[in-house]
């Protein structure tokens, strides 16, 4: 009987070997990384192989898949933020789902409010996540970068954008989000100030006051990269306030062209426990099915 591929998704892979010289007497169960495959090595005793496949393998996959929500399509690198604002929109990068986007903007003093259609969104993540490229500041993390021209020039000029979204661990990732990192590309002159103030919470639904991150550039000070660590959770809600203010001086000036928001994770304790438990089940099955040898 040829190998049969049962699942291509992120699931507990199980390989069953029935050595011919042992006939129906011994089963070795191992956990591997990859698709789930059952490989019967001979046809004698096939009934027991099928029963094992239909019961134990189904239980192992169903139990793990039930731990996590479903995922959506891959996020498109370079798409306009207005695309992300569509009702019911969600997309994935690696093991993260991004959804429930919100956006507001305002301006005064001759500055221009940045529209959602004028903000391009880059996807960030290491190789294999489907992202457009890795973050320069947090290369192992997954996230989004927002690119536009936020400019304030002259006394009391000011422009502001507020972007919100939810990040959730995808189906079967067995991970929890543990931190958020923010990096801005900005500059300022005289009394100008460019900043990004992010606040967040988790698990969703929650109030946006559990943690915060601030990046800031002035004519004499720069803190353009920052991050925070929080209790690992399966989902978070973030909201960032992008502010560019020329200040009170006539020659005040500030600009900001990019904000990158990234997230990293740790293994979920219950997933680790489940894998260990499944390994013990396999060990027990082998002991029970092994016959006495003379």
Image (cartoon, rainbow, N blue to C red):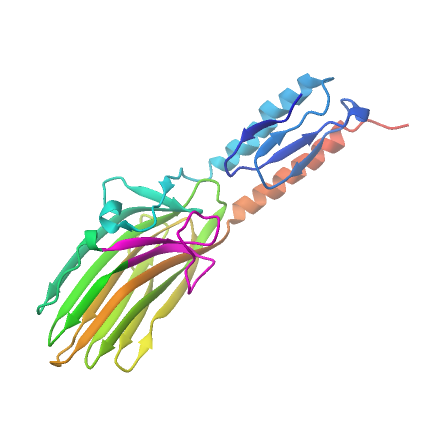
Residue at the outermost left position:
109
Q: In which quarter of the image is the N terminus?
A: top right
Q: In which quarter of the image is the C terminus?
A: top right
Q: Residue 9 in magenta? A: no
Front residue (pair 289, 247)? 247
Residue drawn at (16%, 74%) of the image: 246
Image coordinates of residue 281 in percent, x first then y, are 66, 35
Front residue (pair 262, 110)? 110
Residue at the outermost right position:
294
Residue 27 to residue 74: above or below: above
Magenta stretch: dominant secondary structure: loop
Q: Residue 132 in magenta? A: yes
Image coordinates of residue 121 in percent, x first then y, are 30, 53
Image coordinates of residue 108 in percent, x first then y, are 9, 66
Range of magenta residues: 119-146
Front residue (pair 4, 127)? 127
Residue drawn at (51%, 49%) of the image: 268
Q: How many labels does the image show?
A: 0
Q: For residue 92, what is the image quadrant? A: top left
**Left or right: where does residue 50 sit relative to residue 124?**
right
Q: For residue 156, what is the image quadrant? A: bottom left
**Left or right: where does residue 140 sit relative to residue 102?**
right
Residue 289 to residue 214: above or below: above
**Left or right: where does residue 165 sit relative to residue 141?**
left
**Left or right: where does residue 56 sit relative to residue 74?**
right
Image coordinates of residue 24 in percent, x first then y, are 76, 22
């Amino acid at each position: 009987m040829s190998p049969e591929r049962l699942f291509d998704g992120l699931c507990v892979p199980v390989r069953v070997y029935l050595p011919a010289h042992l006939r129906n007497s011994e089963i070795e169960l191992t956990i591997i990384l990859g698709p789930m495959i059952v490989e019967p090595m001979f046809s004698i005793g096939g009934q027991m192989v099928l029963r094992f496949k239909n019961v134990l393998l189904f239980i192992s996959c169903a139990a793990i898949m039930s731990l996590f929500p479903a995922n959506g399509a891959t996020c498109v690198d370079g798409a306009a933020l207005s695309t992300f604002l569509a009702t019911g929109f969600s997309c994935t990068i690696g093991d993260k789902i991004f959804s429930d986007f919100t956006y507001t903007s305002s301006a005064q003093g001759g500055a221009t409010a940045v529209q959602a259609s004028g903000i391009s969104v880059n996807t960030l993540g290491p190789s294999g996540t489907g992202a457009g490229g890795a973050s320069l500041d947090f290369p192992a993390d997954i996230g989004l970068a927002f690119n536009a021209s936020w400019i304030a020039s002259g006394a009391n000029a000011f422009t502001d954008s507020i972007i919100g979204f939810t990040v959730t661990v995808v189906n079967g990732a067995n991970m929890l989000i543990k931190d958020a990192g923010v990096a801005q590309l900005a500059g300022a002159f005289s009394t100008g100030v460019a900043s990004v103030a992010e606040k967040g919470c988790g698990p969703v639904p929650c109030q946006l006051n559990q943690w915060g991150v601030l990046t800031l550039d002035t004519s004499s000070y720069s803190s353009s990269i920052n991050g925070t660590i929080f209790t690992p959770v399966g989902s978070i809600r973030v909201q960032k306030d992008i502010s560019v203010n020329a200040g009170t001086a006539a020659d005040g000036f500030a600009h900001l062209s990019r904000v990158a928001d990234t997230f990293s994770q740790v293994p979920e304790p219950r997933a680790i426990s489940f894998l260990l438990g499944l390994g013990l089940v396999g060990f027990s099955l082998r002991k029970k099915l092994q016959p006495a040898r003379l």
